[in-house]
Image (cartoon, rainbow, N blue to C red):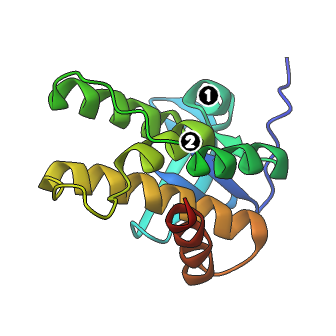
Amino acid sequence: MRQEFAFDAGDYVVYPTHGVGKVLGVETREIAGQELQLFVITFDRDRMTLRVPVAKAATAGLRRLSTRKVMESALTTLKGRARVKRTMWSRRAQEYEAKINSGDPVSIAEVVRDLHPNVGQPDQSFSERQIYESAFDRLVCEVAALESIDKDKATEKLSDILNAT
């Protein structure tokens, strides 16, 4: 059973827990006596290289960049009203982390929208800022890769959307 998970060298992909990376290629390694084919993915932001078994790519959540339609939906989400639940911060923080690690741009956009610091709002805690920045950066990286623009332009685009609301 051959899966249609062919990524070519140079393709941008999203790994849920690390964000946008670039496929360097496929290599074969012997691990525990087994020959394994591995996608070699580099994440410039983290200065990290990840090897994902080709056979496990789907279950690991490795995916292509979002379509423009999905990203438009995520950007529309940014324009919406913040929906902050009245639960304890520790529980909300876990939910936000889960959304970020899902790799889904719309879920990540919800985190950015909900934690975006508004004028007149009390200062955010350190952990709120960290989660916000993590989600914002994840979204910026995918927008930049999808639209073939640099991170600064993508950051400006998202900031304009957030500050227009």
Residues 152 and 161: in front is 161
Extreme front residue here? 120
- Residue beneath the point at 13% across and 56% down: 126
| Mark 2 nearby-residue class (10 Å; few <14, some 14–19, many ≥20) | some
Is any atom of residue 107 visible in this view?
Answer: yes
- Residue beneath the point at 17% across and 32% down: 89
Extreme top residue here? 1
Q: Mark 2 touching mark 1, by CB under 8 A?
A: yes
In the picture, the disc for residue 89 is none
Please indicate whether residue 141 sits to the left or right of residue 125 in the image: right
Q: CA distance from mark 2 to mark 1?
A: 7 Å
| Mark 1 nearby-residue class (10 Å; few <14, some 14–19, many ≥20) | few
Question: Disc 2 designates what residue?
Answer: 52
Q: Please, what secondary structure does the residue beneath circle 1 have?
A: helix
Q: 95 above or below 1? A: below
Q: Please, what secondary structure does the residue beneath circle 2 have?
A: strand
In the picture, the disc for residue 56 is 1
Is any atom of residue 27 visible in this view?
Answer: no
Q: Quadrant of the C terminus?
A: bottom right
Please indicate whether residue 92 sits to the left or right of residue 104 in the image: left
Residue 92 in picture, x, y percent from top left: 27, 29
Please indicate whether residue 25 sits to the left or right of residue 116 in the image: right
Residue 29 in picture, x, y percent from top left: 57, 45
Residue 78 in picture, x, y percent from top left: 57, 50
